Amino acid sequence: EPHVSAAPAEEEAEDVEASVTALLDAGQPEQAITLLQQAMAEHTSDPLLLLLARALMDTRQFDDVEAVLNAVQDQDGNKQALAGLRAGQTAQLPAPQALQQRLQAKPADSEALYQLALHDLARGQAEAALNALLHLMQSDRGYGDNAAQRTLLQAFELLGNDHPLSISYRRRLYQLLY
């Protein structure tokens, strides 16, 4: 019968993850941090730590991000998420909302498109990031000394060569190049 009492805690953690993700996607990282701190007072898990790191990045608290990332127990199992968050941390990018506003005002803003793709990678939204990087290569291939192409190749390596997104986007990249 111990498994019966574990299920509500698991469901509660999933609810917290869903709520925090919704807050982050809505551009409300401060509220997400508050909710995570409350939830983590009772139970800490790698998914909650990764969400906390993302929220801290969104509020530009870069000094705290690395400490949170180091607290993740399963470093190997979360390699992709950790690498993406560390990449976003080192870049110290403008907030995603600011970048989206820049793109609405000027759709050909290569820098904003590239930085938004890095945000997507940091958030584990690989397909959105790959799509944006490929679009950038189509519209401004030489941007940042081929930054889009280099980042695409790094993303393929991060995802793994056998990952369906790597296979699909590598094919699209080669079609674009050749």
Image: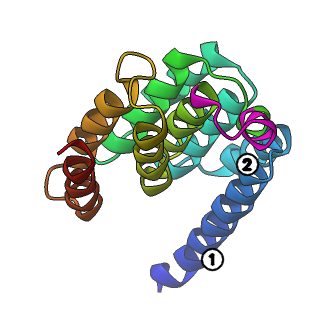
Q: Answer whether residue 104 is magenta in the image.
A: yes
Percent coordinates x, y for residue 36 in the rendering = 72, 46
Q: Residue 24 carries which label?
A: 2
Can residue 74 be seen in the rendering of this structure? no
Residue 8: mark in rendering: 1
Q: Where is residue 6 in the image (x, y as percent from the top left)?
A: 53, 74
Q: Main secondary structure of the magenta part?
A: helix
Whether residue 4 appears in magenta in the rendering, the answer is no
Give the number of the disc on residue 101. Answer: none
38 vs 176, nearest the viewer: 176
Q: What residue type is labelled 1?
A: Pro
Whether residue 173 is visible? yes
Secondary structure found at label 1 = helix
Which quarter of the picture shows residue 52? top right
Percent of width and height locating residue 99: 72, 34
Q: Are marks 1 and 2 in contact (CB under 8 Å)?
A: no
Q: How crowded is mark 2: few (under 14 residues within 10 Å), some or many (20 or more)?
A: many
Residue at image position (68%, 50%) is 42
Q: Which residue is drawn at 79% across and 32% down?
A: 98
Q: Give the range drawn in magenta.
A: 99-110
What secondary structure is found at the residue carrying circle 2? Answer: helix
Residue at mark 1 to residue at mark 2: CA–CA distance: 24 Å
First in residue order: circle 1 vs circle 2: 1
Where 91 falls versus 113 (above or below)?
above
Front of the two marks 1 and 2: 2
Residue positioned 50% across, 54% down in the render: 128
Give the quadrant of residue 15: bottom right
Question: Mark 2 is on which residue type?
Answer: Leu
As drawn, is 97 to the left or to the right of 71?
A: right
> Would you say 66 lies left or right of 166 here?
right
**Where 177 sits versus 1, above or below?**
above
Compared to residue 79, the image places residue 56 above or below, namely above
